[in-house]
Image (tube, helix red, strand yellow):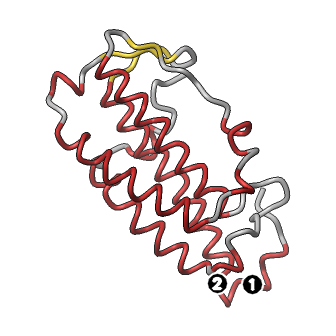
Amino acid sequence: MSANPYASYVEGKDPLRVLAATPRRIEELTEELGAERLDQPYAPGKWSPREILCHLTDSELAFSFRARQALAEENHVIQPFDQDKWAATYAVYEAHDALALFCDARKWNMALFRSLTPEQKARAAVHPERGPLTVWTIVETIAGHDLHHLQKLESIAADFAPANLNKRSTPEV
């Protein structure tokens, strides 16, 4: 398995530009969906847009912790997490709170990521399931993860567009 499972999403793109643009795009999509649609899953057993926002926020915290640990410790071993187990608590969170925390954490993380020296970017860590990686691989992973979930949110928003509401009865496969 690749050290960055989202590498194909970020290929040819500047990860820092992706990371900087994501909060505003999520804000736009949240506005487009409206409060009444944020809790509607796009298909049975799938996450709602609010749950995706919660997941992005949890991931922002987890991935940035990984980067900070790799910067602080020699050959840091990353602790994996089970996103589905973390998602079990998402019912208690409001979409606007998740979005606010995501945006604030991203702003904080961008200051760090923009300041990284070449030596810091190359700092090594090990993911038990993905093998050796660098701090910069973590940054690229966050960007690819953003793009993966932005595509899903954009698809959901398109499905909810007025012209597509009648088509929505067929779940995505």
**Crowding at mark 2 (Cα within 10 Å: few <14, some 14-19, many 20+):** some
User: Which residue matches tag 1?
Assistant: 165
Element on which disc 1 rests: helix
* Location of the N terminus (image quadrant): top right
- Return the x and y of residue 171 as percentages of the image width and height: 81, 65
| Residue at image point 38% right, 56% down | 104
Q: Image check: 135 left or right of 153?
A: left
Checking the image for residue 161, the label placed there is: 2
**Crowding at mark 1 (Cα within 10 Å: few <14, some 14-19, many 20+):** few
- Return the x and y of residue 5 as percentages of the image width and height: 51, 33
Element on which disc 2 rests: loop
| Residue at image point 68% right, 39% down | 86
Q: How many discs appear? A: 2
- Residue 119 higher or lower than 97, as above or below: above
| Residue at image point 58% right, 58% down | 53
Q: Three-letter amino acid code at disc 1?
A: Leu
Residue furthest to the top: 74
In the depicted view, which residue is nearer to us: 86 or 32? Answer: 86
Checking the image for residue 122, the label placed there is: none
- Return the x and y of residue 48 as percentages of the image width and height: 71, 62
- Residue 92 higher or lower than 30, as above or below: above
Asked if marks 2 and 1 touch (Cβ < 8 Å), the reply is yes
